[in-house]
């Protein structure tokens, strides 16, 4: 290994390394899906990524279960209306969603998509 390649490994941020690791794990799925970063409003999309966060709306608000899905190229908000929970969907879970991309307050958003949960690593 050359000195230059060693230096590149040391100078990479932890976030860059995590993106590379995520993209490597999702390689087979990514070939069938779009990158979140390249999606446009109105487009029917198939996305795969990791749930980075989960938000549950307060009891006094209309029920909605909201997650942020991240694939290394970008993130999108995924919202299921009328739900306060969905078994199996939690932060760190890998999943695939299919739906129509919209933009809400400048954020990429998909409402009520179909989804497939990926196996949990043990």
Image (cartoon, rainbow, N blue to C red):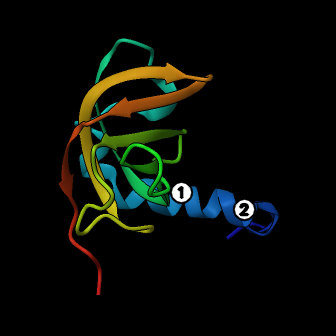
Residue situated in front as seen by the camera: 50 or 99:
99
On screen, residue 13 above or below 43: below
Callout 1: SS = helix
Depth order, front residue of 14/98: 98
Where residue 93 appears, x then y in whole percent? 35, 66
Q: Position of residue 89 (x, y in %)?
A: 31, 64
Which quadrant of the view contains residue 111? top left
In the image, what residue occupies the spot 33% across and 61% down? 94
Q: What is the residue that sits farthest to the top in this orientation?
A: 42
In the rendered structure, the answer to whether residue 57 lies left or right of residue 95 reads: right
Kindly identify the residue that appears in the image at 75 percent across and 62 percent down. 13
| Labelled disc at residue 5 | 2
Label 1 crowding class (10 Å Cα cut-off): few <14, some 14-19, many 20+? few
* 69 over 73 or under it: above or below: below
- Please give the name of the residue rendered at 52% of the width and 30% of the height, measured from the top-left corner: 37
Q: Determine the residue positioned at 75% across, 60% down.
A: 12
Find residue 80 and report its horizontal and vertical position in percent. 31, 43
Farthest bottom residue in view: 122
Q: CA distance from mark 1 to mark 2?
A: 16 Å
Residue 56 % position (x, y): 45, 57
Question: Disc 1 marks which residue?
Answer: 20
Looking at the rendered image, the quarter that the N terminus falls into is bottom right
């Amino acid at each position: 290994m050359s000195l230059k390649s060693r230096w590149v490994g040391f100078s990479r941020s932890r976030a860059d390394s995590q993106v590379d690791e995520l993209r490597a794990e999702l390689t087979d799925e990514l070939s069938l899906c779009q990158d979140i970063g390249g999606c446009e409003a109105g487009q029917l999309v198939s996305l795969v990524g990791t749930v980075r966060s989960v938000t549950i709306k307060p009891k006094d608000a209309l029920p909605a279960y909201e997650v942020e899905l991240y694939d290394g190229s970008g993130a999108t908000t995924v919202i299921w209306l009328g739900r306060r929970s969905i078994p199996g969907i939690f932060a760190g879970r890998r999943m695939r969603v299919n739906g129509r991309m919209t933009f809400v307050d400048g954020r990429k958003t998909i409402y009520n998509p179909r989804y497939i949960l990926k196996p949990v690593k043990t």
